[in-house]
Amino acid sequence: MSIILKNATILDPIIGVLQEGLNVYIKNNLILKVTKDEIKEVGKIYDMSGKILMPGLIDAHVHVTASSTSFTNLSRTPPSYITAKSIPILNGMISRGFTTVRDGGGADWGLAKAVEDEYIIGPRILFSGASISQTGGHGDVRKLGEDFIPADRFQIGTLGKVCDGVDALRKACREEIRNGATQIKLMVNGGISTPTDPIENNQFSLDEIRAVVEEAENANIYVMAHAYTAKSIKRVLECGVKSIEHGNLIDESTLDLLIKKDAFLTPTLVVYYAISTYGEKYNLSKNVINTAKNSFRKGIEALKIASIKGANIAFGTDLIGDLHNLQSLEFKLRGQVQSNIEVIRSATIYSSKLLQMEDKIGVIKEGAYADLIVFNKNPLNDLNILQKKEEIKAVMKNGKWIIKAF
């Protein structure tokens, strides 16, 4: 099917301004032309006068199968039920304009394929499969004294796979690569929501981390690492990790190293805000809530410094359970310390570069996927427009309207 969008005003995140009077020719799932000239090809014509088009958004840190705030409970839940509960989560993401997401643990190739084949309406999923954790690490969701999860077990919805030693890690990586993982997720630091890993703890030896990076690079993919502290971030950057997730406690010298390595920082401010604000409602402990409050404050500071220094900053949210509906609040939170265009770039061109798809997503240009959002108002002037579903007049993914209200 061919579509022609006439008289469009396009928000180009690369140059950071609106471009008026453009015509966009879409065939099948691709953008074939973006021009001021009249398009003479045959297709369904939509007059976009008075409307603003921008590329579909990218969330580079999600857990689409996390329908509960407890990964321990999810590990006891049948895969069929987890899949069913993932459907409204995916529906919600694409209705907010996110046409591509990178899953940091829990989604598998089957769920990604179901979306690709349109059995489920949702964003394109770039999946890690199992996040990889050491015993007692951030992906080990057993409670104290429990030993019910075998080290080699992974099913959809389970946060990760527990394994120790270079050989075990190599095998774990090769299994995820065999199943089509687009990146390897590695837990290298403690966290705020699992029972046996204080946030200041480093995880995995350097030899283990290097082995994971080597396996990823052999498959032409990369490693995303859950890491908070400067010490933890520095050691994994020196091992070749490409993507630092969270990074709230990073310092200036480590940011300089991240920039030198051309690595990426993916802050996830909204998850700490959400836990701080709604943690009691979900029976989270005071310790978890207080840690989240401190992580939010430090994360804002880290984002401001990283932005000033010119670091590669991707867009991520890391929400779970009922908190998924706060996904777009990340725009407002980042807008406290970044310009509107830089926040938009993080969810488009910067994330697309991290995901190694810079010519396909996050842009409106010839050869890119036809992933688009339509507004009546200009997000460059007000980031709150990206937060409000009622402001989104249409969402297109792969050349098909998912939402169309004009």
Image (cartoon, grey):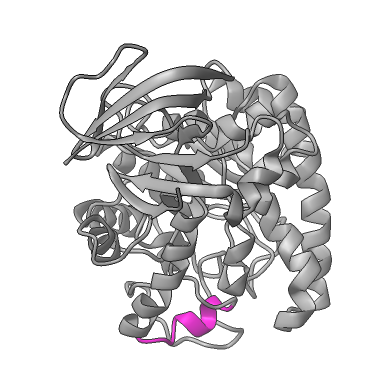
Q: Is 330 situated left or right of 104 in this image?
A: right
Q: Residue at x 53, y 31 (%)?
A: 50
Instruction: Name the spot of residue 77 as percent of width and height, x first.
Output: 41, 86
Dividing the picture into quadrants, the one containing residue 218 is: top left
Does residue 97 sit above or below 364 in this rendering? below
Instruction: Name the spot of residue 68 as percent of width and height, x first.
Output: 54, 78
Question: 405 or 178: nearer the eye?
Answer: 405
Dividing the picture into quadrants, the one containing residue 121 is: bottom left
Q: Residue at x 48, y 33 (%)?
A: 54
Instruction: Name the spot of residue 147 as percent of width and height, x first.
Output: 47, 86
Q: Is 286 situated left or right of 179 in this image?
A: right
Instruction: Name the spot of residue 216 as percent of width and height, x first.
Output: 32, 41
Q: Is 369 situated left or right of 147 in this image?
A: left
Q: Residue at x 50, y 69 (%)?
A: 135
Q: Which residues are magenta?
A: 70-78
Would you say residue 210 is visible in this rendering? no
Q: Residue at x 57, y 79 (%)?
A: 70
Would you say residue 18 is visible in this rendering? yes
Q: How many marks?
A: 0
